[in-house]
C-alpha cells in the first residue's frame, strides 16, 4: 500500500461501476458484554443489531459485495445476561448475530481458560475465535478452539485477520496458573511480517487492546492495513488515522460499547498491498429498528434462564431510591464517587467493622435510575462473582500499614485522571470550612488524610475492608506481594455483595445521600 485515500463521499450506488474492484464490506462490533436487551435508554439490543446487520449484508449483496462481520471482543461477562446457561449463551449469541470472527477479550475468560473452553464446546461456536498472544492454550483446552489468525479468499484476494488480547497484568489472574496473555505488539508485528511473506493482500488486526495501544501498534508496523478494535469503549464516528513506519496512513475503528452502534465500511482491495477505503459509517442501534424474531426469542429465553439461575423474579421489588445507583452509562461511568459509591463503601466498612474501606467505581455494572429498585437491578449494577452459584463477591478484612496506605493514596491521586475510588472512614481537614470532611481522592492532599481523627502513621497498622477479588487477584499474580500488603487477612462471614445490597436497600429505603 502506498497511500490510503479516504473516499467518504462516494455513494454505494456507484460501486458497481468501478472496474475490476475487489470490494468487501466489513461490519464490526465490540464490547457487547452480553447486553442482550440493550441499555436502559432503549438503545441497542441484539435483536435490533441482527436486523441492522442483515440489512447491511443484503444491501451489499445486491451490489455483488461480500461481507465479513468482525467482533472486537468482550462479548461475555459484564451484563447479568452472562448468567444465562452459565456463560454459554454469550457465545451462542455471536453465531445468531452472524459474527464471522471474534477476538478474545479480558471479560471473556473471567471464569478461567478451562471454563471458557467448556463454554465454547457447549455453545457449539461456529465463529472463528482469535488470540495470537494467548499462552497456555493446550493446558486450558483451547488449542484447537482459539487461533492466531484466519484467512479468507475473496475474489482471489487473500485476506488475513489476526487477533490480539490486552496483556494488562491486572486482567491476567483468571487464566493463571494454566495460561497468560503475552505481549501484544511484539506478536502483532511478528504476524504482520509473516503475512507479507505469505502473500497476504489485505491484513486486518482484530484487537482488544484499546485505541491508544492500537495507535502504537499501527505506528510500529509496515504491513498492517487496518485495525478494528475494542476494550477502551471508544466511539469513533470517523476512523482514527495513524501513520505507520512507511509513512502510510492506517485507519483504526471502534464502535463504543454494549451494542449501541454497529460499524460498516466498504474497502476496495486493489492487490499488491494497495487498497482504498471507500465508505465508513457508524449506525446507531435505535428503537426505530425492528427486532429480529429469532434473536428476540433467544433473548426472551435467556431472560427465563437468568431467573432460573437466581431462582428469583427479576422484577421483585426490593425498595426505593432517591439517588441513582451509579455505574456504566453507555459504556462509561459518568458520575464517579457518587452517593451510591459512598453507600457501598460505608456498607463494606460496617460489615467488616474496619477503620476504612475501599470502593472502586470501575467495578460497577449498569447505572440504575432513581425510583423503584428491583432484584434484577442489584445484579445489573454489580454483576461480579467468583464462581458459578455464589452470591457475588464478598468482603476481605485485613491490616495494612500506614506506610502502604500513604503510598496507595499518592498512587490513586496522581495524574490528570485520579482513580475513581471512594474511601469510607478516611477524613481530612478542610481549612476553608474549618471542619473535618470526607477525604476525596484526587481532590484532597494525601499528606492531610486522617484515620480516626489522627494523621496516618507509617509505623501503625490499620484495619481495611475491600472487595475480596483484589487480594484474590494479587494472590494469583504476586502471592508474595499480597501477603506483604495484606496482614491478618480474613474473609468476612456472610458478606456477599448481592444479599448485602438487598438487605441494605430494604432497610434504608428510600435511599438518600449519606449525611456525612
Image (cartoon, rainbow, N blue to C red):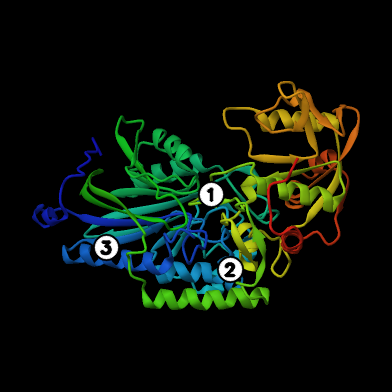
Q: Is residue 234 left or right of residue 85?
A: left
Q: Is residue 88 visible?
A: yes
CA separation, marks 3 and 1? 32 Å
What residue do we see at 69% from left, 33% from top? 440
Q: Mark 3 touching mark 1, by CB under 8 A?
A: no
Mark 3 — residue? 56
Secondary structure of residue under mark 2: helix
The answer to which of 21 and 264 lies nearer the viewer is 264
Q: Which mark is residue 97?
A: none
> Dot 3: within a 10 Å radius of its alpha carbon, few (fewer than 14), some, or many (20 or more) residues?
some
> Dot 2: within a 10 Å radius of its alpha carbon, few (fewer than 14), some, or many (20 or more) residues?
many
What residue do we see at 42% from left, 33% from top? 220
The answer to which of 334 and 165 lies nearer the viewer is 334
Mark 3 or mark 1: whose residue is earlier in sequence? 3
Q: Looking at the picture, how far across and down is residue 416, in whole percent?
A: 57, 28
Q: Looking at the picture, how far across and down is residue 18, in whole percent?
A: 10, 52
Quadrant of the rendering where the C terminus is positioned: top right
Mark 1 — residue? 133
Q: Is residue 467 visible?
A: no
Mark 3 or mark 2: whose residue is earlier in sequence? 3
Quadrant of residue 137 within the rendered picture: bottom right
CA separation, marks 2 and 1? 23 Å
Q: Is residue 44 left or right of residue 471?
A: left
Mark 2 — residue? 87
Tell me if residue 209 comes above or below residue 458 in the rendering. below
Amino acid at each position: 500500500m502506498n497511500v490510503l485515500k479516504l473516499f467518504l463521499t462516494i455513494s454505494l450506488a456507484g460501486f458497481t461501476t468501478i472496474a475490476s474492484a475487489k470490494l468487501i464490506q466489513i461490519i464490526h462490533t465490540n464490547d457487547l458484554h452480553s447486553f442482550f436487551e440493550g441499555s436502559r435508554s432503549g438503545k441497542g439490543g441484539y435483536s435490533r443489531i441482527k436486523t441492522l446487520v442483515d440489512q447491511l449484508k443484503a444491501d451489499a449483496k445486491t451490489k455483488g459485495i461480500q461481507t465479513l462481520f468482525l467482533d472486537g471482543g468482550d462479548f461475555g461477562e459484564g451484563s447479568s445476561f452472562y448468567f444465562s446457561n452459565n456463560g454459554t449463551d454469550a457465545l451462542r449469541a455471536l453465531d445468531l448475530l452472524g459474527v464471522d470472527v471474534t477476538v478474545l477479550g479480558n471479560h471473556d475468560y473471567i471464569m478461567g481458560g478451562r471454563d471458557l473452553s467448556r463454554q465454547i464446546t457447549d455453545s457449539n461456536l461456529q465463529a472463528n475465535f482469535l488470540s495470537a498472544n494467548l499462552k497456555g492454550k493446550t493446558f486450558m483446552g483451547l488449542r484447537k478452539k482459539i487461533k492466531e489468525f484466519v484467512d479468507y479468499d475473496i475474489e482471489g484476494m487473500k485476506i488475513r485477520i489476526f487477533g490480539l488480547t490486552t496483556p494488562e497484568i491486572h486482567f491476567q489472574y483468571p487464566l493463571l496458573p494454566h495460561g497468560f496473555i503475552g505481549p501484544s505488539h511484539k506478536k502483532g508485528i511478528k504476524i504482520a511480517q509473516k503475512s507479507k511473506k505469505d502473500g497476504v493482500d489485505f491484513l486486518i488486526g482484530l484487537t482488544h487492546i484499546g485505541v491508544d495501544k492500537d495507535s502504537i501498534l499501527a505506528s510500529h508496523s509496515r504491513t498492517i492495513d487496518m485495525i478494528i478494535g475494542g476494550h477502551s469503549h471508544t466511539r469513533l464516528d470517523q476512523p482514527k488515522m495513524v501513520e505507520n513506519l512507511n509513512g502510510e496512513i492506517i485507519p483504526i475503528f471502534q464502535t463504543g460499547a454494549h451494542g449501541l452502534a454497529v460499524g460498516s465500511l466498504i474497502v476496495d482491495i486493489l492487490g499488491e498491498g494497495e487498497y482504498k477505503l471507500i465508505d465508513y459509517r457508524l449506525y446507531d442501534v435505535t428503537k426505530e429498528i425492528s427486532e429480529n424474531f429469532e434473536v428476540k426469542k433467544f433473548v426472551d429465553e435467556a431472560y427465563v434462564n437468568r431467573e432460573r439461575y437466581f431462582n428469583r423474579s427479576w422484577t421483585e421489588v426490593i425498595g426505593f431510591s432517591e439517588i441513582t445507583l451509579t455505574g456504566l452509562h453507555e459504556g462509561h461511568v459518568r458520575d464517579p464517587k457518587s452517593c451510591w459509591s459512598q453507600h457501598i463503601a460505608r456498607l463494606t466498612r460496617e460489615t467488616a467493622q474496619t477503620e476504612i474501606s475501599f470502593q472502586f467505581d470501575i467495578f460497577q455494572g449498569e447505572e440504575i435510575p432513581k425510583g423503584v429498585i428491583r432484584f434484577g437491578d442489584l445484579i445489573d449494577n454489580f454483576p461480579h462473582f467468583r464462581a458459578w452459584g455464589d452470591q457475588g463477591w464478598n468482603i476481605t478484612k485485613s491490616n495494612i500499614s500506614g506506610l502502604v496506605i500513604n503510598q496507595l493514596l499518592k498512587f490513586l491521586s496522581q495524574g490528570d485522571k485520579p482513580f475513581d475510588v471512594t474511601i469510607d472512614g478516611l477524613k481530612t481537614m478542610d481549612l476553608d470550612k474549618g471542619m473535618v470532611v470526607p477525604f476525596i481522592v484526587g481532590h484532597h492532599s494525601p499528606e492531610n488524610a486522617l484515620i480516626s481523627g489522627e494523621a496516618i502513621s507509617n509505623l501503625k497498622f490499620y484495619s481495611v475492608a475491600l472487595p475480596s477479588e483484589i487480594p484474590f487477584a494479587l494472590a494469583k499474580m504476586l502471592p508474595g506481594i499480597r501477603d506483604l500488603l495484606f496482614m491478618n487477612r480474613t474473609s468476612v462471614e456472610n458478606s456477599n455483595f448481592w444479599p448485602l445490597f438487598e438487605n441494605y436497600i430494604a432497610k434504608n429505603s428510600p435511599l438518600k445521600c449519606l449525611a456525612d
